[in-house]
Amino acid sequence: MDQNKRPVAPFSLADNTADAAHNPLRRMIFAAVESLLGLRSCQALYEQIDPETSSQDWPAAALKTLGANYQISAADQARIPSSGACILIANHPFGGIEGLVLLDLLNRVRPDFKVMANYLLARVPQMRERLISVDPFGGEAAARTNLAPLRKSLSWLKQGGLLVIFPAGEVSSWQPRVKGVTDPEWSSTLARLVRMSKAPVLPTYFPGQNGPLFQLAGRIHPRLRTALLPRMLLNKRGQTLTLKVGNLLPAKKLAGFSSDQSLNDYLRLRTYSLALSEESNSRSVAKKKAPAVQADLIAPRSVDQLQAEIDALPDTQKLLQSGEFDVLLTRGEEAPQLLLEIGRLRELTFRQVGEGTGRSCDLDRFDAAYSHLLLWNRQQQQIVGAYRIGQVDQLFAQQGAAGLYTSTLFDFQPQLFERLKNALELGRSFIRPEYQRSYAPLLLLWKGIGHYLVQNPHYRYLFGPVSISSDYSNNSRQLMTSTLSRNYLINDLAKLVAPRLPVSLKPLRINGLSARQSEPLLKDMDEVSALVADIETDNKGIPVLLRHYLSLGGKLLAFNLDPDFSDVIDGLLLVDMLDTERKQLQRYMGREGCQFYLASQQQKLANGA
């Protein structure tokens, strides 16, 4: 037998002691300690594995012999890149089993990998070819010794390989700064490797932790905690671990961090936030209501009826053309068939994402008094999408706040409309499902809004509800609402708005990070969107319309829960067009339209209007 393949006892203390075989007392002491620490049981399990098992098959055999297993969703596994340089990072909650899991998984899906890990693991010969060994125990000698592994790791990444790192270097334990069991501070080696290699990073998360005995031992002395690691491996018998994988973080994004500490904090956030996916999936499924009985949709309006009403519109209501699309403005009384078709398509579209009224047609008492911006496909002769527009000055003059759809969701103080009398209320927007793969339809609708503003330049503000559907997990919804309320709220105007059914805005805690580490990163909605995409099984970020309002400089007034519309959370957002970047205005209004609109607004300000 190849002696390099099967040493006498890789889990034996005596194996490293020259005179152990000639000293009965030492042998007896070592045997007792090995039994107490679980090393003898680990050795016995090791010897049950066929010595001819290849290095590639050995992790699966070890897991089978231990009686442990793991699960990973198909969506998460698909996030592991099939080729190219990549640094896979993972938390370290148990101390051994997570390494076996990653070895087995990567052997199956990405065999060109190596693991930067404790040099003691090289005592298991079947693991040697996968290891880049480091000394995790610190000190000046370790710092010098670890320069060579760092160079090997960089070389491996430059060759296009995948490198696995447990950045903590030791197992998760009680950390007073976060008041919980989590990884200690991550090594700056991670940030250095990321910067020097320019490789993307794949965050990976293992839920769970070792038990109270292990944590207590660590409080007494860290080396005592290390000594218990074999027992922590043995107590995973019969267990199935879960593995969560996040989205690949591009090198260009990671290069933008100003310090190793801020980069490590970000990578840690993206890793530990994957726990939110596990929690949301287990909690939100039980809370979702059974679908309500839904009426059959009304029949589609005939093409002849729709085309006749479009042909009858005056030219001033034909706002723009782009390719096969027209953007048109109409009112319910002048185009009743178009309005019925809008109502049908609204209900159809909202039902696709678990919303909708449940009625045969989504129209209400406000539709008759509002204008409707619609996108029409001339070639297909069909409505592609629509937006409902309410002229606040006119509606308020006729019915007061009750004339606004948003009054069904929020209570308004009269002073609000003294501030926002030159406003348009937007809402009930949709793009029919077969057109949603492209951003162009929504862009055209917003160009229509831009053209409308140029035609009616006295309107300065846009406001309306933006929905966060119950199709998002509870954690994603809490992450979005808490971030918006903390960083995007207009405090003076928010005091004039009260939701009919308030939403809890408690900040979402991400275990494993202190507030110092997480709060600066959670001020940026682009980062929140990336976290949401990690959490959601279908990889969706924040709602497209919410992202769009924020890109225009939108701010928050309030949140409301709408039980009559499948428990969506409606955020009341306000856009001041004078605060919107000029480049954005030109995108929707055109250069000349933007100049005319801004000049009109400046004239109003000069006149004190």
Image (cartoon, grey):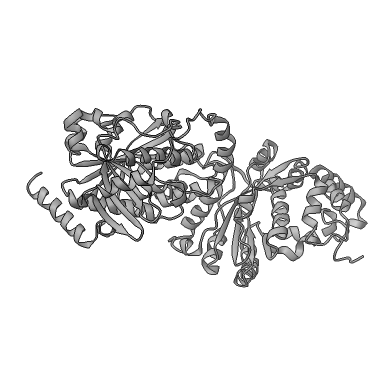
Q: Is residue 385 left or right of residue 510?
A: left
Residue 235 percent coordinates (x, y): 76, 41
Q: Is residue 345 visible?
A: yes
Q: Is residue 163 left or right of residue 304?
A: right
Q: Quadrant of residue 584?
A: bottom left
Count of numbered circles in the view: 0
Q: Is residue 134 visible?
A: no
**Against 581, is 151 above or below?**
below
- Residue at horizontal 8 percent and vertical 45 percent from the top: 608
Viewer-nearest residue: 523 or 408: 408
Viewer-nearest residue: 441 or 419: 441
- Residue at horizontal 43 percent and vertical 42 percent from the top: 480
Residue 53 percent coordinates (x, y): 85, 59
Viewer-nearest residue: 244 or 396: 396
**Against 391, is 268 above or below?**
below
Residue 500 percent coordinates (x, y): 34, 27
Viewer-nearest residue: 436 or 98: 436
- Residue at horizontal 89 percent and vertical 66 percent from the top: 2
Residue 38 percent coordinates (x, y): 81, 45
Q: Is residue 205 left or right of residue 33?
A: left
Q: In which quadrant is the N terminus drawn?
A: bottom right
Q: Is residue 140 left or right of residue 469?
A: right
- Residue extending farthest to the front is 304
